[in-house]
Amino acid sequence: MLEATTPEALLSLRDVVITADADGRTLLDVPSLDLLPGERVAVTGPSGSGKSLLLNTITGRWPVGVTFDGTRTTALTRIGFVPQRGLDALHPLLPLGRQLNRVSGADPARVAEVLDAVGLQDPELRRRRPTELSGGQAQRAAVALAALTDAPLVLADEPTSALDHESRDLMLRLLLDLLGEGRTLVVTTHDPIVADVLGARRIGVEAGQITEQRAPAQEPGNPSAHPTGTAGDHMRKAG
């Protein structure tokens, strides 16, 4: 009988400890973590628990004033990132369409296709600078940029924190639709429902310590949890 094989991890952390330089406090302790191709992961926990520091560790970029110890292993050269504020992912002065084309290397037709999918189909919006967009529009543009990079791993830091329940589910559906099945998505959230909507593996973070557990068996984007139609349709209706 053939044994089932485990997909090779996109990124692995082993015996990771991050400490504060000022007083030596342990800010994050990760004995072992693997991110697998195509999986959905929800990092849950209260504010200040270490969720964002875990994302920093996944990207390999840490804030000033901390020391990393341990092993981070990956062959990835690109990691997509959707920040909590869309403007943080964009150059404030470059017109949106031109910027996405330049940063991602995608041709204008592909940029237009993805912007349409996130509800930014108006050509006038594509000519605007990010500072001329609303907060919601900038967030959608950040999602579009992450999708256009074609990075195998995409991280989203609290992308639904300022959204009502319907908009939250639409944003998550949008991420799933744009990334497809082959790319890995990691979302930080203080909302436990996000893991259910994504059909994701949960990683709980509490006071810098992490525990892993499997989410309830559920298909991502269960139709009972979403209005009918595509995410892009609803984003356009929402304005």
Image: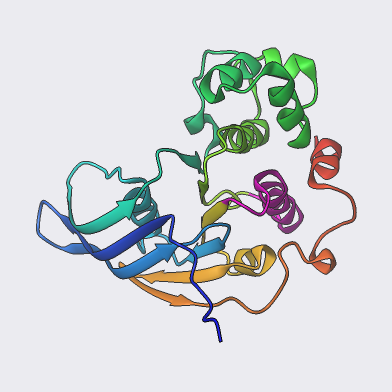
Q: Position of residue 220 (x, y in %)?
A: 71, 64
Q: Residue furthest front?
A: 1
Coloring basis for residues? rainbow
- For the point 52% across and 40% down, the residue is 151
94 with respect to 115 (left or right) = left
Quadrant in which the C terminus appears:
top right
214 with respect to 33 (left or right) = right
Foreground pick, 219 / 90: 219
109 with respect to 103 (left or right) = right
- For the point 62% across and 31% down, the residue is 138
Q: Position of residue 206 (x, y in %)?
A: 37, 71
- For the point 69% across and 43% down, the residue is 178
Q: Position of residue 185 (x, y in %)?
A: 55, 54
Asked whether 41 falls inside the magenta stretch, the response is no
Q: Does 37 sit above or below residue 138? A: below
Asked whether 168 falls inside the magenta stretch, the response is yes
Quadrant in which the N terminus appears:
bottom right
> For residue 98, which quarter of the picture?
top right
- Residue numbers of the magenta segment: 163-183
38 with respect to 62 (left or right) = right
Q: Residue furthest bottom?
A: 1
**Residue 221 in sight from this viewpoint:** yes
> For residue 18, which quarter of the picture?
bottom left
Q: Does 171 sit above or below residue 197? A: above
Foreground pick, 150 / 85: 150
**Residue 207 in sight from this viewpoint:** no
Considering the whole magenta stretch, tell me its main secondary structure.
helix
- For the point 55% across and 54% down, the residue is 184
Q: Does 70 sit above or below residue 218? A: above
